[in-house]
Each structure stands twice: as structure tokens, then as C-alpha cells.
Image (cartoon, rainbow, N blue to C red):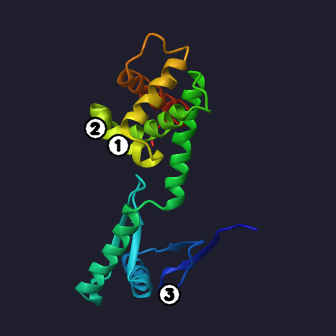
Amino acid sequence: MSLYKTSVAEAPFASVRYSKNEFGFYIACDDRSILKCINAMLLDNGMVGLSDTEGKVHYLIDGRRGGNYALGRVKEKVLKLREPSPSDTGYEDAIVYQAIDTVLERYGFPETLSGTRILRYLLFRLYREPKLLKSAAKCLYPLAREEFQMSPAQVERNLRYAIRKNTKLKEDTRLIMVLRKLHDKTLEEVLQRYGRAY
């Protein structure tokens, strides 16, 4: 059984209500039929979405119902498009965390150290806001302090300890350089695995 129902209607009889799981195909042979079909849809829904060849959706809103109605429909569509759904954000976060975990594992950071957990959190924040890397002591450490209930000095000490314990980063001992290197590797990992940055 198909998830999508397909309805085909001739334009003169086009007063069809449809659900979210249904596609509608309307065959119109002349301008009058096209206008009747669009008018019927506008009367039913107050709005019609038309897709162009690039896949962009253009909305036609029935202005005959008044300016406030049209403005409300525009706001309704714009707000739905602007706000990502929690499931999308959770999926993107999981992808980024998976890439960060892969990079940290590749560099041999032990999961048991609190410095590694702090590093994981900071790399995620850097992925979302790369400008935070410019002033790590002023921006990044306070974020970790709030998350892990530590002072900025404790955050820095735990990070330095995790880096000192790491055997693969012996040449890079400066914290900011390690963060920059791991951030770059995280970006590469996400692009390599998923083809685009989230």
C-alpha cells in the first residue's frame, strides 16, 4: 500500500480537499481551466504553493480575504521556514558529536578524563560558532565553566592535563593551537562523512 495517494481531476471539477499525505495532479487544457483550478484551491486553503524547476516554492495567497488574512498566512509560512524542527537540530547535533568523537578517538584522547569531555563540548561550541576561537579565555572557558560547574582555571587545567596525556599532540602544546587543529579536523570529518557542513 502506498503512502501517497494520487488524485487526478479535470480542472472544471477541481474543488478537491487534500491531506498532507496526498499529491494532487490537475490537468488543465486552457487558461480558464487553470484559473478555475487555482481559484478552487485558493477558496479551499487560502494559499497555493507553486514549485519552479529549481525546486523553489512560491506561494500565492488569496488577497480577496483581506490584508490581515494575507499577512497572517505569510507570517505563518515564514515562521515555519525559519525555525528548524527539534528533530532536525537533534540529528545535526548527533552528526557533529559523532565527528568530534571520531577525531578525539583518532588523536587518542582518553574518554575518562574530564579534560576530554570539556574538549568535546568546546569543539561542539566551536563548530557552531567558530568566532569563539579568537578569544578562548574570554569566551570558551566561561561556556565550559557553566556547563561543567568549574572555575575557568579548573577548565584550563583539565584541558592542559588531557593534552599533556595525549601522545599524538606532543609538538602542539599550546591550548589554542590544539583547539584550532582539532576544530579543523572536525570540519574535515563532517565534510568527508556527510558531504557538507551542518
Please report whichever mark, 3 or 1, sits nearer to the chain's N-terminal start: 3
Report crowding for label 2: few under 14, some 14 to 19, many 20 or more residues within 10 A (C-alpha): few
Would you identify the image quadrant in which residue 105 lies?
A: top right
Residue farthest along the right direction in this orientation: 1
The mark lying in front, picked from 2 and 3, is: 2
Residue 155 in the image: state x and y as whole percent.
42, 35
Three-letter amino acid code at the position of disc 1: Pro
Alpha-carbon distance for marks 2 and 1? Answer: 7 Å
Q: Residue 85: horizontal and vertical position, in percent?
A: 48, 62
**Above or below 87: residue 157:** above
The image quadrant where one finds the C terminus is top left
- Label 3 and label 1: CA atoms lie apart by 59 Å
Residue position for label 1: 142
Which numbered mark, 3 or 1, is in the foreground of this view?
Answer: 1
Would you say the residues marked 2 and 1 are in contact, meaning their CB atoms lie under 8 Å apart?
Answer: yes
Quadrant where the N terminus sits is bottom right
Between residue 78 and residue 65, name the one nearer to us: 78
- Callout 2: SS: helix
Classed neighbour count for the residue bearing mark 3: other residues with Cα under 10 Å, few (<14), some (14–19), many (≥20): some
The residue at which mark 3 appears reads as 15
The kind of residue tagged 3 is: Ser
Q: CA distance from mark 2 to mark 3?
A: 62 Å
Q: How many marks?
A: 3
Q: Which residue is mark 2?
A: 138
Label for residue 121?
Answer: none
Position of 167 relative to 94 (above/below):
above
Give the image location of residue 69, x and y in percent: 30, 85
Give the residue at x 57% y 34%. 101
Q: Between residue 71 and residue 59, name the one nearer to us.
A: 71
Q: Is residue 191 left or right of residue 36?
A: right
Of mark 2 and mark 3, the one earlier in the sequence is 3
Q: Residue at x 37, y 38 (%)?
A: 152
